[in-house]
Amino acid sequence: MPYRWNQTSETEQELRLWPHNSLPPRGAMIAILSVFLFGLIPLLAMLGSVILWGLLPFLLLTVLGLWLAIQTNYRARSAFEVLTLNGSQAKLVHYTPGQGDQEWSCNRYWARPEMHIKGGPVPHYVTLIGDGREVEIGAFLSEDERITLYDDLVEKLRSPAAQ
């Protein structure tokens, strides 16, 4: 699961959520190298020809475009969320690269999770309600993970103090 509960002290616990990372950096390097090497195969027939210099920039642009796409994806996946629960407060911070952090906090007694099975941007959309605001949590998780997250949040927020 791309989230984990941590007990930070006797009275405080923390939930960290992050997007999936299905392509590690080593896999990205292998993919880019493979595209480059397979792109060289047709160019081998052009060795010693002027046509090689006409086709080579297109291969290099393809490899550069793939590298830029993977780097952009890594930057987007570096977003994460932290929900901190202590005896009296619930605080959610959404960290997004290149944008300001978004914070939400309220009295833990009034905080409650809500699941929107339909009508949200994704099925089984999970939000936290409290202090007159409703904020999303775990929108980048899969549907099954959001359902499990909702159940965890219901259990953790019902307990009077951090377990």
Image (cartoon, rainbow, N blue to C red):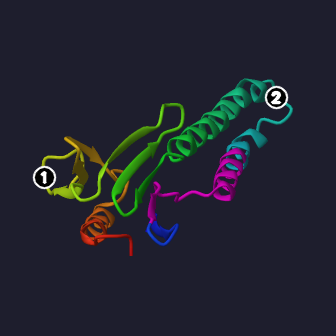
Residue 92's x, y, as percent?
38, 49
Whether residue 33 appears in magenta in the rendering, the answer is yes
- The residue that appears at 65% across and 47% down in the rendered structure is 35
Q: Residue furthest bottom?
A: 163
Please provide percent x and percent y for residue 14.
45, 62
Left or right of residue 144, residue 19 in this image: right
Q: Percent from the top left, x then y, of residue 40?
A: 73, 43
- Above or below — where is 66 with respect to 15? above
* In-front residue for pair 12/154: 12
Q: Nearer the viewer, mark 2 or mark 1?
A: 1
Q: Residue furthest right?
A: 48
In this rendering, is residue 148 above or below 129? below
Magenta stretch bounds: 12-36
Q: Mark 1 points at which residue?
A: 118
Q: Does the magenta stretch include residue 135?
A: no
Q: In the image, what residue type sits under mark 2?
A: Ser
Q: Name the residue under label 2.
A: 49
Check the image and report above or below for 65 versus 158.
above
At horizontal 66% and vertical 54% (from top left) the residue drawn is 25
Left or right: where 117 falls relative to 76: left
Q: Which mark is residue 50?
A: none
Which sits in the foreground, 50 or 16? 16
In the picture, residue 155 is in which quadrant?
Answer: bottom left
Q: Earlier in the sequence, mark 2 or mark 1?
A: 2
Query: How packed is label 2: few (under 14 Cα within 10 Å), some, or many (20 or more)?
Result: few
